[in-house]
Amino acid sequence: MRKNTKRVAFASGLAVLSIVALAACSSGSTTSTPAASAGAGGIDLAAAGCPATVVIQTDWNPEAEHGHLYQLLGPNPVIDANKKSVSGPLYANGAATGVNVEIRSGGPAIGFQTVTSQMYADSSITLGYVTTDEAVQLSADQPTTAVFAPLDKTPLMIMWDPATYPNVKTIADLGKTGAIVRYFGGSAYMEYLTSAGILSKSQVDGGYDGTPASFVADQGKAGQQGFASAEPYQYQYEVPAWGKAVNYQTLNDAGYPVYASAVSVKTADVSKLSGCLTKLVPVLQQAEVDYFKDPAAVNKLILDLVTQFNTGWVYSQGMADYSVKTQVDTGLVGNGDNSTLGDMDTARVQKIIDLDTPIYAAGGKAVKTGLTAADIFTNQFIDTSIGMK
């Protein structure tokens, strides 16, 4: 999924900003290392039936949007630069839980395959990031069930140059100008935008390569796909040939409210992992609350991982800081319309099913017959008392 919606080593030509390394971490994996015993009175995920190593597959390189996962790691995590993974005892509230966690990078680390395909190819993966439209698309053959939504709104957006288009406030406004809009070909959201008449098929260009080159070369005459938590900072401060602000609208605000990177399991595993998920999902919720309360240490780890993994992905301290602030300030992360972090709304999920089912059918990919929101997510493991303050 991320190849279609995420930046693909877009900043490979940019200068890498100076990164402060963590204390030396050796290569290897903790999958065979005995987990630290759960602390007295703490959360015991081993007793709850969780695997000895909870393996989590992400959809991209390490970044602040994934901070809640890296928050799970205790002291001295082990980095495997070859596998593009990091692992160690899984911590909750400052104490070991009796199991390990291994966080694997996606995107270039998995050949830009979908997380869902990885989950079905590798039985060691416990949880993976699956965006709602991916869950819809693969519901017939590779069904997944989301159990926790770390992002309340998708950061996926279309951006434009405010100097070139001073009167454009929305994607629909941009559509009326006739401007070309670049995106990763095959993305379901673009089919939504064109079928809804927000953009016309004649103005969209699926040849976006993930780099700033074309946007800079045509001096902002075209719109372009991006992420609200990254590109606005990158283009203003880390693309010297551009060096100014861009405007944007998110896909959520344009009527396509997917849950991006929802933490999911294979649907057949929901029952088997029920005991584990009952204890683990609240740990994930609290880890996100803790991360946004004080992200500095985790962001330092993220920068070190990016350096050691060396995939061509460039990520700076400034980008991480911008991402954290933007996620909170714009409601990309948060409690939504209640006081609970990470729960999902049935109406929103059903809307994506209704929008995407005919889109996938037209492309020759039938979704599960009679698919409903209950088939691809559940709030049953969410602790409603945990939320962002």
Image (cartoon, rainbow, N blue to C red):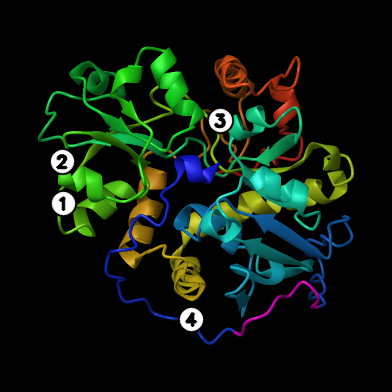
Q: Could you tell which of marks 3 and 1 lies nearer the N-terminus? A: 1
Task: Please name the residue that numbered disc 3 is placed on.
Answer: 338
Where residue 183 sits: x, y (%)? 37, 36
Q: Could you tell which of marks 2 and 1 lies nearer the N-terminus? A: 2
Mark pair 3, 4: CA separation? 38 Å
As drawn, is 235 to the left or to the right of 99?
left
Mark 2 surroundings: few (<14), some (14-19) or many (≥20) residues within 10 A: few
Q: Magenta residues? A: 26-33
Task: Please name the residue that numbered disc 1 is placed on.
Answer: 242
Amino acid type, mark 3: Asn
Residue for point 88% across, 39% down: 271
259 vs 231: above or below: above
Mark pair 4, 1: CA separation? 32 Å
Mark 3 surroundings: few (<14), some (14-19) or many (≥20) residues within 10 A: few
Contact check, label 2 and label 4, Cβ < 8 Å: no
User: Which of pointers 3 and 4 indicates the residue nearer the eye?
Assistant: 4
Visible residue check, residue 142:
yes
Where residue 243 sits: x, y (%)? 15, 53
Residue in the foreground of this view, choosing between 219 and 291 = 219
Residue in the foreground of this view, choosing between 213 and 123 = 213
Amino acid type, mark 1: Trp
Mark pair 3, 1: CA separation? 40 Å
Amino acid type, mark 2: Asp
Q: Which mark is residue 22?
A: 4
